[in-house]
Amino acid sequence: MDRLISRLTGIDFQQWVVYIGFLGIFLFFAATLHDDGFLTERNLTNIVLQTAPVTIMAIGLVFALSAGEIDLSFGSIVAVAALSAAVAMQSYSMAVGIAAGLGAGILIGAVNGILVAYLKLPSFLVTLATMGLFAGIARSMTNLRSIPVVNDAFTGIFGSGKLFTVPSLVIWTVIGVGLGHLIYRHTKFGAHVVATGDNPRAAQVSGIKVPRVRFYVLTISGACAGLAGLLYAGRLQAAKYTLGESDLMTVIAAVIVGGTALNGGKGSVIGALVGSLLMGMLNNGLILMNLKVSDQMIVRGLIILLAVAVSLRDSKR
Amino acid sequence: MKHTLKSIATCAALALATLPAMAQTVGPQGETATATSEIVAPEASIEAVKAAGHTAALLWHDQSDFVNAVTAGATDEFARFGIEVVATTSAGFDAAKQRSDIETALIKKPSIILSLPLDPVTSAAAFKEAKADGVKLVFLSNLPADYTHPDDYAAIVTDDLFQMGKQAADALAASMDGAGTVGWIYHDAAYYVTNQRDKAFKTTIENDYPNISIVAEQGISDPARAEEIANAMLLRNPDLGGIYVTWAGPAEGVLAALRANGNDTTKIVTLDLSEPIALDMVKGGNVAAIVADEAYELGRAMAAAGILDLLDQEVPPFIVAPAVTVTADNVAEGWMQSLRIEAPESVR
């Protein structure tokens, strides 16, 4: 039955839990918060806009986790990328700012990749170290100062702008998820990522260049964090060293709830998107319910715990 | 020569002109302070405000005893005027989350938002939507960049920051009998509140206590590093008479360092109430005094400022709540005055 549903829908049955959970929580909020504006277009758009950077970071993490690696440094990369772009745009054009932000993300991701893939260091320890290293660099880059971003074209493209009536952050989400899903599900590289995470030795024997895959997934994770940094800088019209710092747990939860295995060999970009939206919807709904801050944290924690427990239990079957 | 004399005279005149300003708390844009006691929403308007069905959102930067007391003060004042609080959030010092919290709260169409903008630069865009929706904004301590009063916001309400630093200096000096050496552990971040308090301590020691010298200065941004910072400071200056610590969190680390060194002579003063710090103080340990703010009163004044703005009455741009020096002799009273809650049993 599981296989039949999987074949018919193209979605791994084990990953259905996130869609069911998302729908259940959506319906609950829709019913209880109908009069509080939950279902208004403005609020639903808010949820997508607010989760856009988390979704982009989650896509990168799907690749890293699927290959059997982890990236803990993406929060620090977000801050370095956002600050690099903001500082560059104080003196140079928007193109230089974008290149600086994305370049910083790709470069740090590549450093992680080299240390893991070619120096054979464990990704957990490497990215734990680079998380601290780049958090420190982000602080020292501008001596703890926030940098305003006043380039209207940049803030339009990466933050508050619209293409026709579609907000730019929604477009970035669609592009990121579409491209990520395409590469993950429909390219040889995507298959190699899953094979490497599933059984690296078997993957190596079957001709997959495992170190290269590991290098690329961590570089992709860095690039995604770099893009998330640009989105934050565009949305806030400023960059600060704290950007991305508190997203680590949210992104990991979104990815795991979305059906990506912690120990590699299995993942879903669409699942990560739904996981990310689930996290955003929880934040949104619990505030609209007018719960106390401590109660919001408790309820959010319990729901994530339940969702992760069900996801991991399903994936072990 | 004439030019030099003229320059010296000009400098002296400027220095004298700035002295009174340095001796009091001034707003982020140099605004003169008004005491919270002067901010009173008119009783006569209670029924009119109730009838209008206004609502409020409290969008805080973090969670703490201080925030709880501010929330209690604001909520009680709003309740008096029949204003329902429809959303309460904590951004956990995350500028992006604060932006999201504002957007989410606006869905409930609050008439008033009370909030601490995390950072003048990142908050400027975050509150733009609230401004556009016509929400009355009352800020705690910080002001988003380029916001002007009264068009963009009703008021900034904060602690009497200069008095907090000054009273800490006075308390430490008193515990040292007005003589000796001091270590100054300040907040190493561009943050208006702590920067003003820290500077006020230093200025007061330098100007008012000629027999006390600050011999060690160390910035701190991570409270978890306070113990090692204090250890290094004590290693280089074993005879320190006192240490000023920018707030209670790192002061706990400094206290741990003094205890580990068997040092029971170096005095500590710090800002904001904390049970472990107060416990050491009432037991006659290193802590000489804690300087706190009247957080409940601050919250009440924030709500009152928002209500006055709703009523189209004039609200001063910069409002300050009084500081309270808490020593071993007045812990219970100080706690009640600051947070409007009973002091923990251990320190009563």
Image (tube, coloured by chain):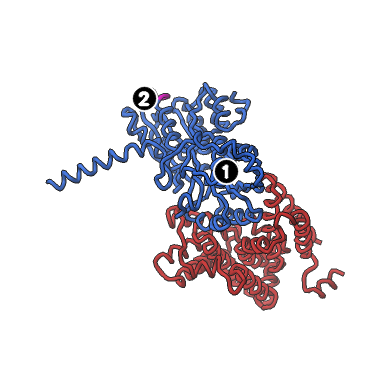
Residue span colored magenta: B174-179
Q: Residues within 10 Å of mark 1 (few under 14, many from 20)?
A: many
Image colour for chain B is blue
Q: Secondary structure at mark 1?
A: helix
Q: Is residue B178 magenta?
A: yes
Tell me if residue A265 comes above or below residue B312 in the rendering: below
Q: Specify few, some or many for label 2: CA neighbours under 10 Å numbering under 14, 14-19, or 20 or more.
A: some
Q: Quadrant of residue A212?
A: bottom right
SS at mark 2?
Answer: loop
Three-letter amino acid code at the position of disc 2: Gly
Specify whether B300 is left or right of A13: left
What colour has chain A? Answer: red
Asked which quadrant contains residue B12, the reply is top left
In this rendering, the answer to whether A70 lies above or below B272 is below
Q: Which residue is mark 1?
A: B307
Residue in the picture at 41% in, 37% down? B184
Q: Are marks 1 and 2 on the same chain?
A: yes
Is residue A32 located in the magenta-colored stretch of the structure? no
Q: Where residue B201 appears, x then y in whole percent?
A: 40, 35
Residue B288 position, x and y percent, is 47, 26
Residue B114 in the image, given as x and y percentages of width and height: 57, 46
The CA span between labels 1 and 2 is 46 Å
Q: Which residue is mark 2?
A: B178
Taking depth in this image into account, of A273 and B280 the one nearest to the observer is A273
